[in-house]
Amino acid sequence: MILEHLGFGSLKILGLALLAGLLFRGVFNKYGHGLHNIPGPWIAGFSDLWRLFLVRRRHAQEEHIALHQKYGPIVRLGPRVVSIADPDAIKTIYSPSAGWSKSQFYPVQQALAKGKRLETMFNTANDRYHAKLRRSVSNSYAMSTLVAFEPFVDSTSIEFLKQLKTRFVDKPGEDGICDFGAWLQFYAFDVIGELTFSKRLGFVEKGADVDNIIRDLESFLDYVSWDYANSMNHLKVGQIPFLDNLLIKNPLKLWAAQSGLINTSAPVAQFARKHITERQNDESLGEEKSRRGDFLNRFKEARAKDPDFITEQLVLALTVANMFAGSDTTGITMRAVFYFLLKNPSTMNSLLAEISEKSKAGGFSREDGLPQWEEVRDMPYLGAVINESLRCHPAVGLTLERMVPANGVKLAGYFLPGGTIAGCSAWVLHQSTDVYGKDAADFRPERWLEATTEQRRKMNNTLFSFGAGARTCIGKNISLLELYKLVPAILRRFELELAHPEASWKTHNAWFVRQREFYVRLKERKQIL
Ligand code: HEM
């Protein structure tokens, strides 16, 4: 009706006005934010759509590396977004006292439980809330408590090795091909379930995704990295939450969920809630069990100290943060370690030699072959392999975005006004030939052993797989515990070979860089190595 009344001429004027508005907006985006002198693709400054489509192609990590190779240490990715490749910038951007908050990219990652956002340490952009929360629970993740976590890791490892043996070992043809990438992910999910609730999710026993937890998490990551909200920033329609608020966090949907009319809770939040309730029931029946070193118990202790701040909802958020941040990331790194070892036989042989030497010298105590943290934590070649895998395939595949503080800052030779989104990507930093040598593109663990003390310090400071500064990964020690223990545990029991030696895995960057099509065959060793 309205269109009929308007007539063709009016529509034309409307169309032209709209076009002029868009053009004006594009030109303002390009030249109005004080970033027009920053190098980068000409088109990137006009709209966030350019980087939206870059991320949607799912290989952003490689495209970011190529952009920095072409344009240098600073590249403009959007109207108000830059990527930095200068290792010296890490201190400026991420240091605890720098006042660079996380960008609005992070709150999009807040999962829902009964229609309420779970604001976690990982996804909050509120620095004061974050600092208080991190202080309240940092003890739970401390290196000194790692030993208490070992039995949880061992229990999943025993089941994992058993399942590999019964399902794949020495089987001919297709039956003997193990989708090792999937199995390592099952393992990582089950370990984090066990560490957090003293309960495995059951992936390893079933050899499958339980309750679609992995499927849900992956589609959530696809949603997050699609970056709806950032794409709208330049339109000033409401910063990040706009599309997120229309889609997953639509207020009507949240209201219906809070009223119990619909269920918006992520499967992982449902799993967490179920186990928290179970624990409460056990406690009310006086059934204190031996699982008491787990995260849930530690978070409940933090709640007992400060019940006004650490609410029941926050305990739930803390457990969900563990599952979200600590499962896929660790699984991805485990895949990287085994894949690189299998693709580089001389590296595999060096590691096997180190393990065998240690074993002959009586360096492993358990008869079932599971190494203990104290036995493996100082194995130099194993450490070098893990570091090099973290360097060559960091789990997180986009820039860790932060907001430039109000007064602006000079970085990589350019002034960035306050409010600019700036960040580094581990994938880009790890290609620095200044830090890692001319062969930085290659997987070569020996670089960590050959480096001088000063070089190694630089290499460690630039290793960005766990982030840096105030928001650095709080679960780093846990994931290292898992990696250092699992790699020798598998290699001592099994001989592994690629099922399709000529093929490469496929990667998919949806914030985390997941790998697919990593298949192996397993043979059991006659004797544990
Ligand atoms: C190899 C495995 C892991 C990798 C590569 C990894 C990577 C990261 C990165 C890059 C960050 C910083 C994100 C940012 O600044 O935007 C981070 C934060 C975090 N990670 Fe991890 N992570 C791993 C394992 C874990 C584990 C096992 C847990 C839990 C047990 C965990 C829990 C967290 C939490 C809670 C944060 C937020 C910390 C904060 O902001 O204070 N991560 N992780």
Image: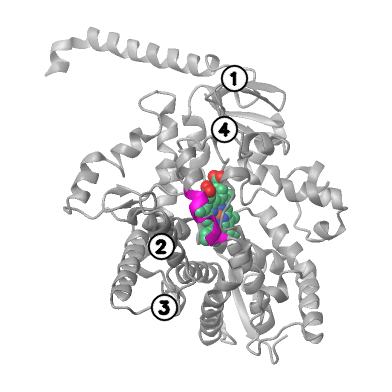
Residue carrying label 3: 206
The local crowd at label 2, few if under 14, some if 14 to 19, many if 20 or more residues have their Cα within 10 Å, is some
Name the residue nearer the viewer: 254 or 492: 254
Residue carrying label 4: 99
Seen in the picture, residue 452 relative to 33 is either above or below; the reply is below
Precedes in sequence: disc 4 or disc 2: 4
Residue carrying label 1: 35
Q: CB atoms at circles 3 and 4 under 8 Å apart? A: no
Judged by its main secondary structure, the magenta piece is helix
Seen in the picture, residue 155 relative to 380 is either above or below; the reply is below
Give the magenta part as a residue range.
133-141
Q: CB atoms at circles 4 and 1 under 8 Å apart? A: no
How far apart, in angstroms, are the residues tagged by discs 2 and 3?
30 Å
Please give left or right for residue 474 compared with residue 213 in the image: right
The local crowd at label 4, few if under 14, some if 14 to 19, many if 20 or more residues have their Cα within 10 Å, is some
Residue at 59% x, 63% y: name it: 479
Q: What kind of residue is marked 1? A: Leu
Precedes in sequence: disc 1 or disc 3: 1
Q: Nearer the viewer, mark 3 or mark 4?
A: 4
